[in-house]
Image (tube, rainbow, N blue to C red):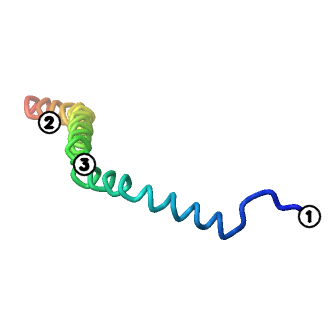
Amino acid sequence: MNDSGPSTDSWQELWQQAYSTAQPTLSTIRDTLGSTTSPHPRIMRVGQLDAELLDQELVHLLCEPLQKALNLFNVCLHLH
């Protein structure tokens, strides 16, 4: 059996070398990501917009039955 590839020790050495070579770049990326601001303000704005739309829909849904009830009450007052 002829093993034409690198030995296990050679692979470990190659991976270790690649890992060590990548560390400065990975460190830079981590630092850059750590110093950027998160998109939380945008999420809050979307949440506020959703809440505003929901409020408007609720007002619209509740106004009609309330107006009908008040009109009935108004009619009753005029009859007596």
Give the foreground label among 1 and 2. Answer: 1
**18, above or below 12, in the image:** above
Per the image, label 2 sits on a secondary structure element best described as helix
Kind of residue at disc 1: Met
Between residue 33 and residue 1, name the one nearer to us.
Answer: 1
Kind of residue at disc 3: Ser
Give the foreground label among 2 and 3. Answer: 3
The crowding category of the residue bearing disc 1, from other C-alpha atoms within 10 Å (few below 14, some 14 to 19, many at least 20), is few
Cβ–Cβ below 8 Å for labels 3 and 1?
A: no
* Residue placed under numbered mark 2 in the picture: 73
Q: Is residue 22 left or right of residue 71?
A: right
* Residue placed under numbered mark 1 in the picture: 1
**78, above or below 39, in the image:** above
The part of the image, by quadrant, that contains residue 44 is: top left
Please, which residue is most extreme toward the bottom here? 9
Q: What is the spatial separation of the Cα atoms under label 3 and label 1, in whole angstroms?
A: 56 Å
Q: Position of residue 48 (x, y in %)?
A: 21, 41
